[in-house]
Amino acid sequence: MKTKVLILGVGNVLMGDEGVGVHVARALESHLWPEGVVVLDGGTGGFHLMEHLELADQVIMIDATLDHRPAGTVRRLRPRFAREFPKALSSHDIGLRDLLEGLTILDRMPEIILYAVSIDTVQSQTIDLSEELERVLDPLCADIRNFARSLIEDPTFCCDGYLDPIGEDEGRLYAHYDIHAKFQEP
């Protein structure tokens, strides 16, 4: 059965902030979703996710990134090809990139919106998130819920309206919407 929207959190929960995508997926699993939305803890990625991605029209992926931005910075990106994902997708980078390259070669790549959550470092042997990431977890989940519902419930919704060209300094072809300001404490 075809999935309209797959919400996919990836990361390694044993490496602290690197597991933020999985923490988000687990938090979102408990919510009631419209028909056609599937939430999946994708762990550290890899080819076992291919079938889930192939069956989805749109994928909302949540992952940590080592992009030299302040920890807790959240950006919503729309990469079109595997090479356009942020370069540092941390420890599961190779398996996830290989998977996305395979889908591109097979011409089965769904539309992917990536919530990239900036982290300072990959911590080992801790399942806890840093204070910076704990602070953005609830607003990030709320933003993803609203975004996913818009994709399902509004036939005229176009995420392009929420994306702006990314700065040339990054040398990427994807676009982004900086939602970090929403998550700042008043």
Image: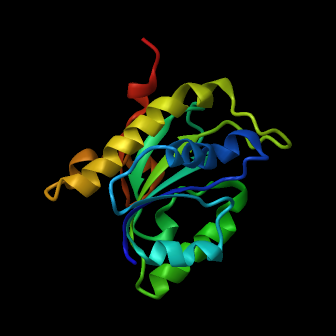
| Residue 111, image quadrant | bottom left
Q: Which residue sits furthest left? A: 156
Q: Which residue sits furthest top? A: 186
Q: Is residue 184 above or below residue 161?
A: above
- Which residue occupies the foreground of this view, 82 or 173? 82
Residue at 58% from the left image edge and 57% from the top image edge: 87
Q: How many marks?
A: 0
Residue at 45% from the left image edge and 43% from the top image edge: 31
| Residue 42 horizontal/vertical position (percent) | 61, 61
Locate the C terminus by quadrant.
top left
Q: Is residue 147 above or below residue 39?
A: above
- Which residue occupies the foreground of this view, 123 or 4? 4
Could one spot residue 165 in this view of the protein?
Answer: no
| Residue 11 horizontal/vertical position (percent) | 66, 53
| Residue 156 horizontal/vertical position (percent) | 13, 56
Residue at 50% from the left image edge and 60% from the top image edge: 85
The colour scheme applied to this rendered structure is: rainbow
Locate the N terminus by quadrant.
bottom left
| Residue 178 horizontal/vertical position (percent) | 38, 38
Q: Which residue sits furthest bottom? A: 106
Could one spot residue 77 in this view of the protein?
Answer: yes
- Which residue occupies the foreground of this view, 138 or 125? 138
Residue at 45% from the left image edge and 21% from the top image edge: 184
Q: Which residue sits furthest right? A: 125
Q: Is residue 185 above or below residue 88?
A: above
